[in-house]
Image (spheres, rainbow, N blue to C red):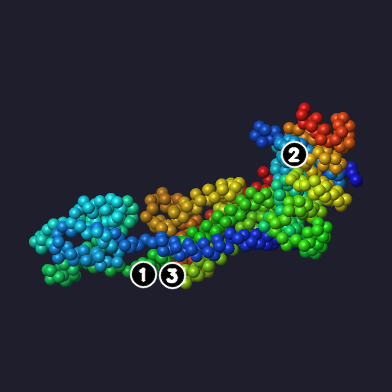
């Protein structure tokens, strides 16, 4: 894994309040270019809130945040050109076909016709979806949808891809294949920012942060965290942190 | 590739792939145009009448035969007992009672005037007014015939009388269907423009794809144009389709310039689409939207003058109509189609709509947010 020292995401004292409820409490962290950054936490810990701010879907209450070199307050449109996003809520169009979904997002990112044709062919080939490229999304199995959604999210070769619980409800084999795809993406120089509940998946990350009640309680390489908390796996690390 | 073009392709594909859509565009309008045009009739037919004849004279029989010969009246019951007839009225078996009292004919001969009682069920005031008017027409006819036959007076001879012959402009045969049809066309165009647009927008919100769109570099205006333009096209098509159906079924007159009508409709649709967009920004689910949209639709339509003339509404109601876009279109479509009004005649409505479109679209676009 090539972990450069460049900070592609830089977050300092990020706060997000909903009324009197503090969803993100002075988060401070950075993400290196090209790494897989695991963003862990229990339900309601504030992961989705943070990811939505980084993607420009939501305004932070305060803090300094730069994504792909741009400020989230004033340069959201520039950020959006450099990121991909896949949410826990499934985000392809159910009433469009596999091919139409790919071409739609490709068109949105202004790829030219030649690029689209070429990359679509490659993608369908790699995912084994060529025979069903004209089938509606609603008619294909969840695992395939998930893989396709990820591929669409990185189709325009973004600097960073944000994945919000991408493997929810997917069988172990598909999850494994999904993580292989994530790995392949980093080979192409894409930084991966991923949230998950599955602690075994945390092991695949270069570094992980663990959020508890809106705060980051731990942030390091999985091996270092396991040592620090004297645990045999990430699951134990998580439980120790979440229970305190 | 051009983003707007890409999005438009997507919208059109989705709209026409929706099984619900084609019936909405073709079948429902035709059904509405046929059923509503006839059903929303302002004419009265088959008025049910009970006759209480306590005179049994040739005069009373003549009067009764005038009613039974009229296509508008159906004599349900004939009796000499007033209470019996009143009971029928109470149980809604008849709409009106014609009460001919004892000595009806005798008084007519001796005193040259006589009494007659009409009892009308006035639960529906409009209907009662119409029944009364129809009855009076027949009684007036009877009156002049009696004068001529029995007293040798010409209907309009020996005594000075004015006969009024009305000439009805712009709808000489008083064909309510023509009037009604143009109104229903306005409802259709409004329904499609406002409701379908708003539903489409909220549906994407519900499915979560709006969020996906919001993390892409699509500009707000691109997304909004791509959402509104297809329904603008469909609504304009609907107007053309409706006019064609009207021409075939009702021989709908088109006295004025159709180009002008479509020009006005284009501007009108910007307002309607703007309202749809605005409603979608304040609702999170299709259910919420339907509730709010129905409130607006029903208010707009009932106030617009489709059934009841705006001129007969109280002053405050007429003023509310200043912000009711349907009232403008309702007036203009009838002016152009039936009266042949030109641009000069509708210019006030035209500029008002233009102004309205700018306001509502600005409001809706400002209220639409990519970032929360």
Q: Give whichever of B263, B128 is nearer the camera.
A: B128
Tell me where residue A180 appears, x and y as whole percent: 85, 49
Q: Residues within 10 Å of mark 2 (few under 14, many from 20)?
A: many
Tell me where residue A177 appears, x and y as whole percent: 82, 50
Q: Distance from label 3 to label 1 (Cα)?
A: 15 Å
Q: Is residue B17 visible?
A: yes
User: The N terminus of chain B appears in which quarter of the rendering?
Assistant: bottom right
Q: Is residue A29 visible?
A: no
Looking at the image, residue B112 lies above or below residue B291: below
Mark 2 chain: A
Q: State the residue at coordinates (28%, 62%).
A: B74
Query: Counting residues from the N terminus, which is met first, the one under dot 3 or under dot 1?
Result: 1
Q: Give whichever of B348, A106 is nearer the camera.
A: A106
Q: Are marks 1 and 2 in contact (CB under 8 Å)?
A: no
Q: Residues within 10 Å of mark 1 (few under 14, many from 20)?
A: few
Q: Secondary structure under badge 1?
A: loop
Q: Please give the residue where the numbered disc 2 appears in the rendered image.
A: A47
Give the quarter of the image for residue B9. Answer: bottom right
Name the side, left or right, on which B154 lies relative to B17: left
Q: Residues within 10 Å of mark 3 (few under 14, many from 20)?
A: some
Furthest residue in direction top, as rendered: A244
Name the side, left or right, on which A4 lies relative to B252: right
Tell me where residue B234 appears, x and y as whole percent: 58, 63
Q: Please give the residue where the numbered disc 3 appears in the rendered image.
A: B250
Q: Secondary structure under badge 3?
A: helix
Q: Secondary structure under badge 2?
A: helix
Q: Give whichever of B162, B248 is nearer the camera.
A: B248
Tell me where residue A20 appears, x and y as whole percent: 66, 32
Q: Please give the residue where the numbered disc 1 appears in the rendered image.
A: B172
Q: Are marks 3 and 1 in contact (CB under 8 Å)?
A: no
Give the quarter of the image for residue A102. Answer: bottom right
Looking at the image, residue B106 lies above or below residue B286: below
């Amino acid at each position: 894994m090539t972990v450069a020292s460049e900070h592609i995401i830089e977050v300092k004292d990020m706060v997000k309040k909903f009324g009197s409820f503090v969803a993100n409490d002075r988060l401070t962290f950075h993400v290196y270019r090209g790494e897989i950054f695991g963003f862990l936490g229990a339900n309601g810990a504030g992961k989705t809130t943070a990811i939505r701010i980084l993607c420009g879907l939501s305004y932070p209450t305060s803090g300094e945040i730069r994504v792909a070199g741009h400020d989230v307050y004033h340069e959201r449109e520039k950020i959006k050109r450099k990121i991909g996003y896949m949410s826990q809520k499934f985000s392809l169009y159910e009433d469009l076909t596999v091919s139409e979904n790919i071409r739609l997002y490709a068109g949105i990112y202004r790829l030219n016709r030649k690029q689209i044709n070429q990359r679509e062919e490659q993608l369908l080939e790699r995912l084994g979806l060529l025979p069903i490229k004209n089938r509606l999304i609603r008619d294909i199995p969840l695992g395939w949808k998930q893989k396709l959604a990820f591929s669409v999210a990185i189709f325009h070769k973004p600097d960073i891809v944000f994945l919000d619980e991408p493997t929810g409800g997917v069988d172990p084999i598909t999850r494994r294949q999904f993580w292989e795809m994530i790995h392949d993406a980093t080979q192409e120089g894409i930084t991966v920012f991923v949230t998950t509940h599955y602690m075994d998946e945390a092991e695949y990350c270069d570094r992980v942060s663990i959020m508890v009640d809106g705060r980051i309680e731990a942030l390091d390489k999985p091996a270092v965290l396991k040592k620090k908390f004297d645990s045999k796996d990430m699951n134990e690390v998580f439980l120790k942190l979440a229970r305190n | 590739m051009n983003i707007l073009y890409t999005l438009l392709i997507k919208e059109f594909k989705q709209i026409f792939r929706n099984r619900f859509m084609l019936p909405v565009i073709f079948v429902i309008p035709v059904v509405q145009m046929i059923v509503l045009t006839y059903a929303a009739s302002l004419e009265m037919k088959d008025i049910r009448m009970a006759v209480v004849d306590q005179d049994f004279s040739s005069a009373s029989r003549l009067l009764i035969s005038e009613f039974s010969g009229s296509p508008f009246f159906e004599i349900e019951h004939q009796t000499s007992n007033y209470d019996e007839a009143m009971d029928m009225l109470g149980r809604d078996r008849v709409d009106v009672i014609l009460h001919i009292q004892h000595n009806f004919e005798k008084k007519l001969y001796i005193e040259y005037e006589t009494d007659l009682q009409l009892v009308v069920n006035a639960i529906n005031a409009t209907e009662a007014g119409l029944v009364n008017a129809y009855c009076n027409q027949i009684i007036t006819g009877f009156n002049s015939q009696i004068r001529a036959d029995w007293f040798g007076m010409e209907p309009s001879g020996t005594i000075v009388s004015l006969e009024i012959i009305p000439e009805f402009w712009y709808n000489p045969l008083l064909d309510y269907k023509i009037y009604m049809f143009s109104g229903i066309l306005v409802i259709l165009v409004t329904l499609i423009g406002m409701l379908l647009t708003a539903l489409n927008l909220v549906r994407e919100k519900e499915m979560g794809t709006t969020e996906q769109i919001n993390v892409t570099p699509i500009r707000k205006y691109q997304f909004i144009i791509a959402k509104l333009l297809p329904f603008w096209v469909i609504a304009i098509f609907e107007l053309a389709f409706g006019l064609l159906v009207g021409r075939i079924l009702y021989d709908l007159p088109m006295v004025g310039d159709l180009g002008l009508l479509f020009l006005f409709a284009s501007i009108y649709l910007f307002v309607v689409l703007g309202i749809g967009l605005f409603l979608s920004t304040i609702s999170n689910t299709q259910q919420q939207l339907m509730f709010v949209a129905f409130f607006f639709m029903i208010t707009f339509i009932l106030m617009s003058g489709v059934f009841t003339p705006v001129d007969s509404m109280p002053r405050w109601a007429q003023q509310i109509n200043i912000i009711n876009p349907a009232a403008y279109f309702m007036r203009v479509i009838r002016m152009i189609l039936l009266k042949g009004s030109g641009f000069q005649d509708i210019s006030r409505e035209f500029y008002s709509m233009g102004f309205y479109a700018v306001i509502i679209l600005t409001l809706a676009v400002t209220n639409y947010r990519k970032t929360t």
